[in-house]
Structure formats: C-alpha cells, structure tokens
Image: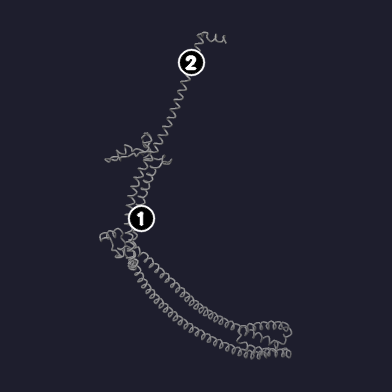
Amino acid sequence: MLRRGKKAKTPLSEEEQLLLYQQKLLAEEEMAKKKERLLSQFLKDKLAKEEQNSALNLNKINTQWRTVLREVKTKELHKDIEILSQTFERVVDCKDSVIKSLAKDLSEAEEQYAHALRSHLHNIDQLLDLQRRRLHLLEENYNNELEVLTKEFETERKTIINQHEKEIHYLQDVFMAMEQNYIDSEYESKLEFQSMWDDLKNKNLEEKHFLRIQLENVVEDLWRRFQEALKNYTDATEDRKIAFETLKVKDEKSSKEIEAQMKKIQKLQEAITISKGKIMLHSRESEDQNQYIRNDKELVLIQLRKLKSQRMQAREVSQENLVKLTLESNATLKALKKIVDKGEKILKLAEICRKYETEEEKVLPFYSSVLTANMQEENEEQNPEELTMELVKVMADYVGMENFWKRYNKVKLEQLSLQHRRAQLLEINGKLREMLKQYLDGISVSDEVLSKFNPLFIINHQSNLSQPLSTSTAQSGDKPPPTTYNIIEAAHIISHTL
C-alpha cells in the first residue's frame, strides 16, 4: 500500500501531461456534441409541435371560413326559394287560366264534334243511298243487257235450226234424185245388156273357154271392189241404208239369177263381165257423186262447228263481262270503303288538331295571303308558267284545297320556326353547360382538371391560362383586350401565409 501511494504521488512527465490534456479535450468535445444533439432533438420536437399547431389552426380557420360561406349560401338559397315560390305561384295561376280555357275549348270542341258527327252520319246516309241507287241502276242495265243477249241468242238459234232443216230437206231431195237417176241408169243398162247380149252371143262363144279362168279372177276382183265400194257407200250414207239394203237384195237376186244362168248357159258369162264393167263405171260415177255429197256434208258440219264456236265465244264473252262487272263492282265498293275510312281518319285527325288550335286560329281559321300584289307579280315573273287548258282544268279541280294548303303552309312555317328556335336553344344550352363545366372544374381538384387550363389553379402566384397575344389586340382595332381576373381561394392564402 505504501508503495502504491508513493508511485501516485510521483510527478508526471510531459508526455503524460500531454496525453491527459488530450483526453480532457476529447471529453469536452463529446459533451459539446451531446449538447448539440439534445438541442437539435429539442428543436425538431418543437418544430413538429409547431407544425401540428399550425395544421390545427389551419383546420380551425377553414371550418370558420366554411361556416361563413354556408351562412352566405343559405341566405342566397333563401332568396332563390322565395323567387322560385313566387314564380311557381305565377306559373300555377297561368296554368289554372290555361286549364279553364282548355275546359271551355273542350266543351266547344265536344259540341263541334257532335255537330260534325251528325253531319258526317247524314253525309254517309246520303252516300249509301246514292250507292244503292247506283247499284240498282247497274242491276237494271245488267238485266236489260242480259235479256237483249238472250233474245239475240234465241233468234240466232232459230235461224240456225231453220237453216239446218232446209239443208236436211235439200240433202234428202238430192238423195232421192240420185236414187232415181240410179234406177234409170240401171234400167238403161239392162236394156243395153239385153241388146248387147244378143249381139255378142255368137262372137264370144269361141273365146269362152280361153277367157273363162281369166274372167273368173276378174269377176272376183270386181266383186271385191264392188263390196268395198258398197261398204264405203253404206258408211257414208247411213240415212239411205234401208234403200241400199233393198237394192242389195235385188242385186243378190240378180246375181243368183246370173249364176243360175251361168250354170245353165255358159254364153251369158261374157255378157255378165261386160255388164259388170258397165256397173263399175256407174259405181265410179256414183262414188264421185257420193264424194261430192260428202264434201257438201263436211262443209255443212264445218259451218255448224263455226256457229257453235261463235255461240260458245259469245257465251264466254258474256260470262267474262259478267265477271268483270262483278269485280269492278267489288273494287268500287272497296274503294268507296277506303274513301269512307280515309274521311273518318281525316275527321278524327281534324278533331285532334282542333284541340291544339289557338284562339286566333279558331276565330280566323283561314288567314288571307301575306303577299301583296307587287310581291305576287314579282313571284310570277320569277317563276313564269304557261297556262294550258289541261293545267287550268287541273287547277279548277283543286280550287277547294286552297284553304287547306294555306293552313298546311302556316303549320309548316311554324314548324320550321320552332325547329330554328330549338336549334338556338340547344346552342345556348350547350354554351351554358360548357360554362357550368368550367365552373365545376374550377371548384374541384382532379387529375383531369389539373391537366387542363384552370383559372383557379395557381402555382407561384401564376395561373396556367394562356395569355392573349399582343398581335391579336393589335389586329382587333380600337377595342381594348378583355380584362382577366384571377380568383384565389382564402384557404389557399391562409395556408401559405401561416
């Protein structure tokens, strides 16, 4: 212990004193730094408190300012409400007067409607009576024409029947004359046969055996031809069938007698061949006559067919005329129904339009022309038109529509003026909407508003509105440039001054 004390009390050297002095300086510097840190922290805390107090005071000022603005706004709203109430009462009074006038117009319109309905029903009754009379006249005309056509048809039918009977009698007379001619020719042929038979008896005995076979074939051929001619003759002349049968029986008897005579007398065969040749000649002549008769018959049948076709055509024409008449009558009925419907529709529209007429239009429904005589002459000179007879007739037909066109043109002009007024109001409404949008953009803050020109957006005491150029003011002449006013909110000034 004593040793240690001795050592402490020993004097320090210069180096040790220097080191000790340096340590003291370092300690003092550390103490100064701590004091500076504490002071800076204290100042920061005080600054934060001041900022909090400034924000609180700013909020208080804003609330007080808002209350002041609310009071002013409430006063303005009260005044607006009073004005609106007065205008509303005035509008209600106007509406009441309009309702009374409309009620009066309605009663008058109902009376006019009843009167128009009675007149319309009376006109419809007259039209129906007129149409009934017209249909009755058409029916009478149709019946008269039908009677005339039936009489003509009956007369033509009687004439055709009489002509047919005359032709039948003529054909019967021709048939009887031909039959008489045939009997006479047959008698003459028999006489000739007898005379020739006596003359040729001796001459044909030598050639009998040579021509016997040949004559048999010829006889058969001639007999076949005679049968064919007889068949054609029977087919062509049915009416003379009975007479032909009698002749056929006679012919068969004569053929039997000829065959008996051939068996008995061989010499008669040559005479028979000659007589058959003559018979062929007569048959050819008869065939020619029959063909002529057939041609006459065909001509008569053709004329009969023509008359039948003419009768059918006349009947078809009458039926077509009847169908056409019925179709036209139906079409006229439909057209008249359409006209009646159209008239009813026009009357209904007139009654509806009557409700919207003004007092002036009710008193003076057809106004006089606004154009003077000089203006009408100028219009005619600008639009010259040559009046022809057809145009004058057409204009005369439409003289009754002049008052209608006057009212129509008046309504058209009013429509055009209302359309023009509507366009003007729409333009004013667009301008007011644009001004309202600018005002709303000025009192609201958003990215879209900040990106556009705003009179209330001020940075460093400068607005972002584009200032007018000096050249524009120089070009405008004596008119001074419009003065611009920058409006700054009170809250903005308070936030920058405090």
**Nearer the camera: disc 2 or disc 1:** 2
Q: Is residue 316 above or below residue 361?
A: below
Q: Quadrant location of the N terminus? A: top right
As drawn, the residue found furthest toward the front would be: 2
Relative depth, front residue between 286 and 80 = 80
Relative depth, front residue between 344 and 17 = 17
Residue 419's mark?
A: 1
Task: Tell me which corner region of the image, top left, top right, bottom left or bottom right, holds residue 347.
Answer: bottom left
Residue at horizontal 39%, vertical 67%?
Answer: 348
Q: Quadrant location of the C terminus? A: top left
Circle 2 Cα neighbour tier, 10 Å, few/some/many (<14 / 14–19 / ≥20): few
Task: Tell me which corner region of the image, top left, top right, bottom left or bottom right, holds residue 239.
Answer: bottom right
Circle 1 Cα neighbour tier, 10 Å, few/some/many (<14 / 14–19 / ≥20): few
Which three-letter amino acid code belongs to the residue tagged 2? Lys
Instruction: Measure the C-alpha gap from mark 2 to mark 1.
Output: 100 Å
Q: Is residue 425 left or right of residue 149?
A: left
Image location (x, y in percent) of residue 67: 36, 43
Residue 219's mark?
A: none
Which three-letter amino acid code belongs to the residue tagged 1? Gln
Image location (x, y in percent) of residue 421: 34, 54
Task: Tell me which corner region of the image, top left, top right, bottom left or bottom right, holds residue 466.
Answer: top left
Relative depth, front residue between 262 and 318 = 318
Q: Is residue 258 left or right of residue 22?
A: right
Quick one: SS at disc 1? helix
Q: Which residue is mark 2?
A: 24
Q: Earlier in the sequence, mark 2 or mark 1?
A: 2
